[in-house]
Image: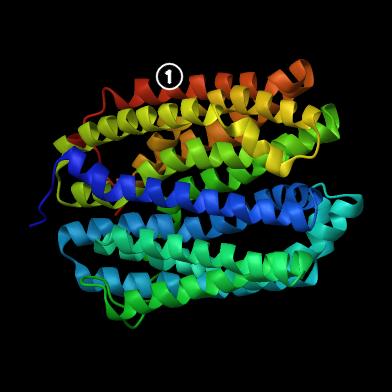
């Protein structure tokens, strides 16, 4: 019989650790980019921002398998079907490795075409092409490391995940100082530092999973097409969410390039990074941290505990994100000065941080609802919410509001889309009776 703790205990043990991990990693990655901007130039920020949506889409493929697997494994652990959980995990990791081999090959063969497709032009195209070619060598390590992290989380050790992610990010920062600032390796040094840190992360996570996990182990894979389909189906919502987040960023980038100025693009490249660190990473850490708990509760038929934990986590993460956003306003203009060259661009960045940052505060419940339904093995609701939010509402309203309202459009487009999703999420979840719900078998 699986024992369950209080909402506050789960939030502290699982969500707070991931929030801390995400914020610390984000700040260290920001320091990375300061090094890039200082020793390579501000164009490296624009290049990595343009490449970012494509990297998100690649990571989404991992999410397609690992989000569905994480929910399914949590369900099996709740039912005490441990061997089935182990063999299924091994099977999915093997499938994912094969897919990433093909994707890596495509990026190695066509880096310039891909960089051009995401909007890179002129000197930015050269930087984006070089960075994309070298960083793609680490795609396999990045995806497999995150896959083992999901399984270790289900095994019940979120503290290890927090430590190894922070350590690998610190290694990345140290290598960037060495390669870019001291050895002057430029874009190559920036990319290869990321590859090495991803490989170290993979080695540590795979070692822990193979030798230290208490419940989950690497066993002979069970090749079961039905289970594969079931996992893909359940992971489709999170895949769509992350893939379309990349699509949304791509469309926003195009809207800024088309309707605003190059200064807006430079400012947005920096500001969006800090909005992710100070706001989005808190919401994502909360929802991701609690996914295995929701799955176990569903497997153990603790239906009465699901909605209170969801409500508690949304309220707590709202308080944290709002507090950090208010505090960050006091020093964000000073931070922007490290990245941006002139005062006019800094002022644009400050304006975008206030307006777009405020709008991003509204994304918590829509994101939480999507990840919640995936966790309890109800992918259909999650897919509908995800498609509506990130493929239809956010790109559509963001693009046309930027077209109509200029730099105010990013804020209003985001708020309108998120308010629609907040109302829909609340109206749908509030009357639900989980005892009467069926789950994907």
In the foreground, 352 or 141 = 352
- The reply to whether residue 169 is in sight is yes
Q: Where is residue 311? Give x, y as percent.
A: 27, 29
Which of the 4 image quarters holds residue 355?
A: top right
Check the image and report above or below for 296 versus 150. Answer: above
Residue 424, image x and y in percent? 43, 22
Q: Between 152 and 350, which is closer to the camera in this rendering?
A: 350
In the image, is residue 157 above or below residue 273?
A: below
Indicate the quadrant containing the N terminus: top left, top right, bottom left or bottom right. Answer: bottom left
Residue name at image x 14 percent, y 43 percent: 302
Q: Which residue is mark 1?
A: 423
- Rendered residue at 40%/68% (across/down): 148
| Picture quadrant of residue 10 | top left
Looking at this view, name the residue that lies furthest to the bottom: 220
Q: Position of residue 128 (x, y in %)?
A: 79, 57
Q: Give the mark count.
A: 1
Label 1 SS: helix
Position of 199 relative to 319 (above/below):
below
Q: Residue at left 29%, top 73%?
A: 86
Picture quarter with the C terminus: bottom left
**Colour convention of the picture:** rainbow
Q: Residue furthest right?
A: 122
Of 354 and 245, the residue lying toward us: 354
Q: Is residue 274 left or right of residue 70?
A: right
- The reply to whether residue 106 is in sight is no
Give residue 316's quadrant in the image: top left
The spot of residue 357 in percent (x, y) is 57, 28
47 on left or right of 78: right
Residue at 77% from the left image edge and 16% from the top image edge? 404
Packing grade of label 1 (10 A; few <14, some 14-19, many >=20) is few
Pick the residue in front: 39 or 284: 39
């Amino acid at each position: 019989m699986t024992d369950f703790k209080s909402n506050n205990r789960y939030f502290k043990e699982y969500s707070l650790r991931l929030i801390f991990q995400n914020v610390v990693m984000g700040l260290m990655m920001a320091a990375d980019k300061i090094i890039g901007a200082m020793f390579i130039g501000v164009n490296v920020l624009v290049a990595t921002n343009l490449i970012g949506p494509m990297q998100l889409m690649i990571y989404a493929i991992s999410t397609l398998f690992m989000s569905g697997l994480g929910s399914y494994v949590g369900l099996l652990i709740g039912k005490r079907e441990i061997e089935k959980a182990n063999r299924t995990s091994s099977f999915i990791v093997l499938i994912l490795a094969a897919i990433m081999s093909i994707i890596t090959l495509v990026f190695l063969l066509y880096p310039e075409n891909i960089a051009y497709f995401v909007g890179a032009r002129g000197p930015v195209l050269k930087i984006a092409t070089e960075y994309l070619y070298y960083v793609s060598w680490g795609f396999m390590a990045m995806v497999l490391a995150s896959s083992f992290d999901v399984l270790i989380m289900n095994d019940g050790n979120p503290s290890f995940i927090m430590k190894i992610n922070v350590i690998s990010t610190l290694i990345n920062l140290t290598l960037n100082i060495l390669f870019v600032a001291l050895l002057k390796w430029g874009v190559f040094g920036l990319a290869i530092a990321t590859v090495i840190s991803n490989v170290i992360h993979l080695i540590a996570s795979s070692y822990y999973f193979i030798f230290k996990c208490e419940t989950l182990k690497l066993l002979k894979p069970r090749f079961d097409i039905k289970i594969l389909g079931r996992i893909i189906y359940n992971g489709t919502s999170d895949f769509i969410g992350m893939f379309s987040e990349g699509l949304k960023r791509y469309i926003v980038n195009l809207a800024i390039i088309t309707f605003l100025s190059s200064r807006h693009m430079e400012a947005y490249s920096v500001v969006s990074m800090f909005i992710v660190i100070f706001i989005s990473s808190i919401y994502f850490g909360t929802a991701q941290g609690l996914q295995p708990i929701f799955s176990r509760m569903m497997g153990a038929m603790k239906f009465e505990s699901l909605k209170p934990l969801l409500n508690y986590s949304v309220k707590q993460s709202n308080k944290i994100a709002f507090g950090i956003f208010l505090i960050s306003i006091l020093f964000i203009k000073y931070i922007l000065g490290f990245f941006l060259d002139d005062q006019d661009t800094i002022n644009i960045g400050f304006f975008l941080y206030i307006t777009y940052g405020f709008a991003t505060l509204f994304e918590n419940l829509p994101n939480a609802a999507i990840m919640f339904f995936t966790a309890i093995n109800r992918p259909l609701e999650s897919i509908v919410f995800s498609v509506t939010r990130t493929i239809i509402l956010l790109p559509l309203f963001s693009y046309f509001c930027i077209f109509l309202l200029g730099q105010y459009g990013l804020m209003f487009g985001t708020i309108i889309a998120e308010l629609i999703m907040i109302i829909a999420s609340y109206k749908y979840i509030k009357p639900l009776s989980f005892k009467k719900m069926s789950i994907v078998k």
